[in-house]
Image (tube, grey):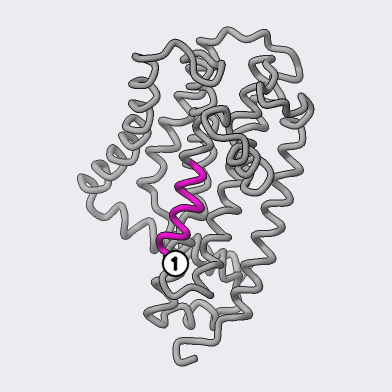
Amino acid sequence: MADRRVWTALLRAGLAGQTAYRASFALELLGAACAVGLDFIEVFAIFTRVPQLAGLSYLEVVLVFAIASTGFATADAVVGQTDAVIQHVRKGTFDVVLLRPLSVLGQLAAADVQLRRLGRVVVSVLLLAVVLVRLDLDWTPGRVVMAVVAPLVATVVFAALFVTAGAVSFWLVEATEVTSALTYGSAYLAEWPTGVLTAVLARFFTFVIPAAFCGYLPALTLLGRSDPGGLPGWLPWASPLVAVLAAGLSGLLWRSGIRHYVGAGG
């Protein structure tokens, strides 16, 4: 109960600061929502020039985009704050976090929740709902399960990437470019069919960094399509296991980073 009161106090303090100026907060929400629209414009622009992309139609690519965008936006809202670890390390404020007898990752998440990111979550979920209706899929039990599981898996995988990016900050002096490439770069690639990549990169972003499990592979199952690159049809159903493995590995790396940290004066 004591821990819960601390979490609640940290969360309330963070939320109160963000909502103190309502007009500014509303503009931030709108800006975050528009970010999805700007990303979506790229998809729309490409399909003004080509009828298909990697064998998928416009709406089918939008489905890939929507699944990945929903997962990334949700993960960003929950644990995207780990991007700030490098700033805490540089300023020495990370020592304060370590002094509290609470989860370090939980403190970072609760104390710096960015409500403006909810704008992107809402727009992404709405886009996913609209495209699922527009595609007029044959809703078998398997497709229903995949429609529910896919954005959840994407959320867990992207959350694992955010935590991994935060952990890297304990070893690298300037980790901003590396962490951005890992998180935002993976999110961008997850929004497209892997067929737009070379065979080597497609496999890399499937089996090393599991971006394909965050959009493309679940979309193939929902559409009843097979992968032109020869990936087995059962692979998308392994996505929950991939998410668990990603979360486990990121947790190990995070704990290793915490042990590696020697303090502001180290």
Q: Which residues are magenta?
A: 175-187
Q: Position of residue 45 (x, y in %)?
A: 33, 21
- The residue lying at 57 percent from left, 53 percent from top is 161
From the image, give the main secondary structure of the stretch colored magenta: helix
Task: Please determine whether, in this image, residue 100 is positioned above or below residue 212.
Answer: below
Judge the density around disc 1: few (<14), some (14-19), many (≥20) Cα neighbours within 10 Å: some
Image point (47%, 66%), residue name? 9
The relative height of residue 94 versus residue 235 in the rendered view (above or below) is below
- Decide which of 123, 182 is in the foreground and name it: 182
| Kind of residue indicated by mark 1 | Ala
Could you say whether the residue bearing mark 1 is in a helix, strand or loop? loop
**Residue drawn at (51%, 13%), measured in percent from left and top?**
57
Residue 230 as seen in the image, left or right of residue 51: right
Whether residue 248 appears in magenta in the rendering, the answer is no
Would residue 24 be found to the left or right of residue 198 on screen?
left
Which residue occupies the extreme left position in the image?
A: 23
Q: Position of residue 55 (x, y in %)?
A: 56, 16
Relative height, residue 219 to residue 13 (above, below) = above
Residue 152 can be seen in this image: no
Residue 176 forms part of the magenta stretch: yes
User: Residue beneath label 1, please?
Assistant: 175
